């Protein structure tokens, strides 16, 4: 599973970049990009600004998360915040711990990429109607799925670093 994490993350970055770049061209010149209660738009962006904004969130943010969780622990051991840290960072377990954190970071990055790409697809749906309206049921479903997946990600981290596992 850990060997799959990095290639999947890279593949999802590529797919989301292509998806967002290609589909943004089909949006109106002014895109409803923020929505209030009931799904009514209350914020707008130009197509170019929207494209840059979405790519930053779908590509730059996940890469920053992955690099932060992969590079920082190798350079500054004090930055690692895991249960039973002293045990897991003993020399005999340190490399395996750092490899796990890097793979787990890729899973989190993948989760963020998919979430942002799904938000983009919802915004396409919202802008396809006149006046634009966010499909709130789909948005809340997506949000719940993301939060549950994030909870699973956190539980897996905790399970991996329980004492003596």
Image: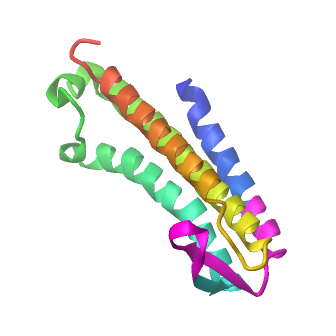
Which residue, as the protein is rendered here, is positioned at the far left?
Answer: 86
Taking the magenta stretch, the answer to whether it contains residue 31 is yes
Residue 165 in percent (x, y) is at 29, 12
The one nearer the camera, 79 or 59, is: 59
- In percent of the image, x 61 and y 52: which residue is there? 137
- Say whether residue 106 is visible: no
Residue 92 in percent (x, y) is at 26, 19
Residue 81 in percent (x, y) is at 22, 40
- In percent of the image, x 80 and y 67: which residue is there? 23
State whether residue 164 is above or below residue 111: above
Say whether residue 146 is left or right of residue 114.
left
Magenta span of residues: 18-42
The one nearer the camera, 6 or 29, is: 29
Q: Quadrant of residue 116?
A: bottom right
Model colouring:
rainbow
Count how many numbered circles sit on residues in the image. Answer: 0
- Say whether residue 146 is visible: yes
Taking the magenta stretch, the answer to whether it contains residue 165 is no
Which residue, as the protein is rendered here, is positioned at the far top?
Answer: 164
Which residue, as the protein is rendered here, is positioned at the far front?
Answer: 38
State whether residue 35 is above or below residue 160: below
- In percent of the image, x 73 and y 79: which residue is there? 131
Say whether residue 71 is left or right of residue 88.
right
Say whether residue 85 is left or right of residue 93.
left
Residue 140 in percent (x, y) is at 55, 51
């Amino acid at each position: 599973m850990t060997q799959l994490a990095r290639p999947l993350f890279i593949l999802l970055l590529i797919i989301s970049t292509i998806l967002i770049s290609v589909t943004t061209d089909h949006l109106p010149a002014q895109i409803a990009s923020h929505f209030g209660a009931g799904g009514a738009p209350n914020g707008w962006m130009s197509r170019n600004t929207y494209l840059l904004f979405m790519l930053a969130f779908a590509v730059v943010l996940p890469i920053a998360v992955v690099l932060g969780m992969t590079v920082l622990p190798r350079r500054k051991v004090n930055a690692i915040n895991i249960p039973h840290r002293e045990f897991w960072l003993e020399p005999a377990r340190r490399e395996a711990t750092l490899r796990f954190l890097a793979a787990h970071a890729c899973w989190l990055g993948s989760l963020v990429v998919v979430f942002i790409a799904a938000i983009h697809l919802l915004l396409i749906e919202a802008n396809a109607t006149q006046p634009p309206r966010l499909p709130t049921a789909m948005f809340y479903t997506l949000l719940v799925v993301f939060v549950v997946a994030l909870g699973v990600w956190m539980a897996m981290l905790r399970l991996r670093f329980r004492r003596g596992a």
